[in-house]
Amino acid sequence: MANPGDILRDRYQIVRELGRGGMAEVYLATDLYEQRAVAVKLASLELFEDAETGARTRKLWLNETRLAGRLRHPHIVETYEAGTSEQHAYLVMEYVDGESMHRYAAADALLPVPTVAEAVFKVGNALDYASRLGMLHRDIKPANVLMGAAGDVKLTDFGACYLADVEETQVYDVGTLPFMPPEHFENRPPTVQTDIYAVGVMAYQLLTGCWPFRGTTFQALIHEKLHEDFVPIETRRKDLPSALRFVVHRAMHRDFEVRYSSWGQFCEDLSRAVPEQDLPREIVFDSARFNALRGMPVFQGFTDAQVWEAVHMSRWAEKREGERLFSEGDPGDRIFVVVKGSVAILREGRRLNVLEAGECFGEIAYLDETHPSRSASAVAAAASVLLEIDTESLRSASESLQAAFLKAFVRILVERLKHADARFLEARS
């Protein structure tokens, strides 16, 4: 292949090679316009003209190029740009400073159980987002999940994806054999359960370092998938919680009538199956935080990506009963959401209101930039868990998230005005 620096030097400065496969090479590069690190994937156009494999290769590559700017989720590697030069096709993607989870799929390199459960949950949420856009990944495996140096999780390689609205680029015989569901070999069309099965196999492998099958040949493995039961996960590992074993077994069940039929069911069961820790799960796990926020009225109308952004930018804290959160006249530098417990709002020592789980407060100081100080005090009325968002962080967040919060704050203020009017009329009657 030609020197990638010669092809992309006007915009991208190649730093080093990250890896290569049968279809492409991937390089770490600097985007000279945006001043950020990116991953550049290069494929020779000669591959697209090969008499035997060219048509298939073109379709797989086109699948990835169609995703440029389309998939925007915290746990999916974003594709920024796609194009061609005289001899090459290229993709410019988000760079993840880490490595694939394939490294942790061996018995001597397993991650802690909560870490695996957290990663699998995030992959499930990312695939739920993709499925809502009409996409199935169809090649889920540890090698296609990246774990950043800070422990973040990113799903990558959508070349084999099934696009419900793009018939001409479909490639049907794709995937990696151990992760293919039994119905694939009965020529059934792919569904969301195709990816759920693969995630179940991946979870099994990341928890045990073993395959869930006994077969060692292509034919034996297919026969086992179609006609036999997989090896129970407790046979490979004895210390896993029963709830977690149930989730993995159901996700990769041979009968798709028994298998999970939606990511919502899968993620809900998985979040409940994570072992309890010394701290509340609301604080320990991003997945539990996401679940907690997703059902709250404050986040009504938020997309999954916006909720994840809020999770990542917030701080979660426990408060003792009677603990003061802020006083009248303090700077209005934080917005709060009650996750658990209750908070009393006071002015000059008089209780004005008690806010329960799911309610938001502190937004007035954020909205009133000319007088951003507290007009009341807040005290934990009971032992509570609070989400705290720094106002400067919110002002630096994506425009999409800022707009979603602004709409939520307006909705909250309207509701409070309605209640205030109702109390006023009741007092006068």
Image (cartoon, rainbow, N blue to C red):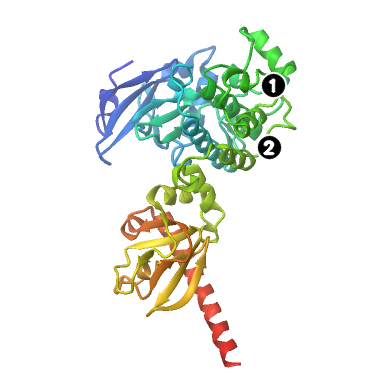
Which residue appears at 53% of the width and 36% of the height? 275
Residue in the foreground of this view, choosing between 3 and 289: 289
Amino acid bearing label 1: Pro
Which percent across, then down, holds residue 61? 48, 26
Categorize mark 1 by other alpha carbons within 10 Å: few (<14), some (14-19), many (20+).
Answer: many
Name the kind of residue labelled 2 in the image: Ser
From this view, report whether residue 7 is shown above or below residue 67: above
Quadrant occupied by the C terminus: bottom right
**Residue 133: percent from the left, percent from the top?**
57, 42
Residue 348 location, x and y as percent?
A: 37, 80
Q: Residue at x 64, y 41 (%)?
A: 265
Give the CA distance from mark 1 to mark 2.
15 Å
Q: Which mark is residue 261?
A: 2
Specify which label sits upstream in the sequence, 1 or 2.
Answer: 1
- If the image is split into quadrants, where does the N terminus sit? top left
The mark found on residue 165 in the picture is none
Q: Seen in the image, is 198 located left or right of residue 14?
A: right
Identify the residue under disc 1.
Answer: 182
Q: Is residue 73 visible?
A: no
Q: Say what secondary structure mark 1 lies in.
A: helix
Tell me the element at label 2: loop
